[in-house]
Amino acid sequence: MISIIVNWHNGEKYLKKCISSILSQSYKKFEIIFFDNSSTDKSREIIHKYKDYRIKYFFSKKKIPLYKARNEAIKKTNYNLIAFLDVDDWWDKNYLLEKKKYFTNHKIDYFYSNVYFFYEKKNKFLIYNKFKLPQGKIFKFLAKNYFIIISGLIIRKKILKKENYFNKNYNIIGDYDLLMKISRYANAKSFNDALVYYRVHDKNFAKINNKIFYNEYKDWFLKQSSSKNADFERNKKYFLLKLKKLEIIYLLYKKKNFKLLLKIIKLPNILLKLKFLIAILLPLKFVKYLRK
C-alpha cells in the first residue's frame, strides 16, 4: 500500500486532471491525502464530488509554508511508502505499476522518475533528462546537476521521520534540502521512463519568486558551509555556481546595472556566462530559459 500526497493552494484549474491521473492508476492499492492549504477557490467542491473511500481531504484554515503543509500531510498518512504529486502535475496510468515489484525491497529507500516537462503555453512536451539516471547513493550526481522532481518521488516514511521531515521554513527548496541530505546515505532506485508530467506555466511558484528562491538557497548554502560536511566540501564548487546563478537571475529581474555585469563576468562557467551576457541585453522573458 502507498500513500499519495497532493498539496495545493487554489488549485481548482488543475485539480480534476491531477485526481483523474491518480484514480486511473493500474496499481490500485493506495490512499490519497489531499491537503488544501487554505484555498479560497472551488477546490473543496471539486474534491467532494469524488465518492472514493481512498480519498481523504484535509483543510488548513490558515495558509502555511509549503513544506510545513507537506509535513502536515505526511502525518495524516497510514502507509510506509509516500508518493508526492503536485496539483498542477499528473501521472501516466502505469506510473505506480512500473515500481510495484520494488516496493517490498527494503534496501531501496526512495524511488525517483524521469519526467516530461509540459509547456502549457506552447502545448509542448520535452523530456527532462536524456541521460541514464543513476541509482544507489547519488549525492555527487545531484550536487553537480539536481534532476529530481517531487512529483516523481516516492520515499519510505522511516527516512522522512529520520530527517524530521522537510524543513518547514522553506517554500521552494524543501525537497532539494531533504534529498541532498538523504542521498549521502540512502539508496535510490531510478526509472528512466518518463511517466510523470510536470506542468510549466506562468504561476509556477519558483518561477515567480526569484528572491525567495535565491534567499532560501543562500540560507541552505551557508548552513552547509558552516557544517564542514565532507561531501559538501568536495562538491562545493557546484553549489557555489548554483548560488551565483540564482543570485544573477534574481538581480536580472530586479535591476540591470554595472554591478550585475561584473557578477556575470566573474562566473567560472563560460557557457553560463555567455547566456547571462546575452540575457542582460535582451528582454526579461529570455531569463526563463536560464532556469533550466
Image: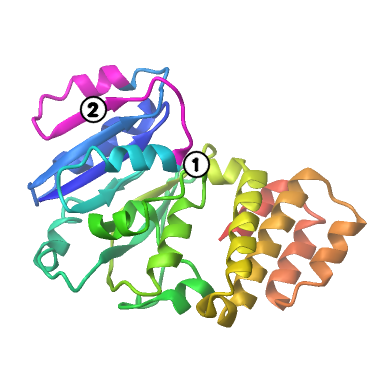
Q: Which residue range is magenta in the image?
A: 44-66
Determine if the magenta segment contains residue 21. Answer: no
Q: Nearer the viewer, residue 182 or 15?
A: 182
Kindly identify which numbered label has been placed on residue 57: 2
Question: In the visual, does 221 lie left or right of 38?
Answer: right
Name which residue lies at 26% across and 57% down.
154
Amino acid carrying label 1: it is: His
Q: Which numbered disc flags the more N-terminal residue, 1 or 2?
A: 2
Name which residue lies at 48% across and 58% down.
177
Task: Report if residue 283 is visible in the image.
Answer: no
Name which residue lies at 57% across and 79% down.
235
Q: Nearer the viewer, residue 24 or 73?
A: 73
Outermost residue on the right side: it is: 258
Marks 1 and 2 sit apart, C-alpha to C-alpha, by: 26 Å
Amino acid carrying label 2: it is: Tyr
Residue 13 vertical placement versus 145 (above, below) = above
Determine if the magenta segment contains residue 45. Answer: yes
Q: For label 2, count other residues whose C-alpha is less than 10 Å away and answer few (under 14), some (14-19) or many (20+).
A: some
Task: Report if residue 43 is visible in the image.
Answer: yes
Name which residue lies at 53% across and 80% down.
230
Question: In the visual, does 122 lie left or right of 61?
Answer: right
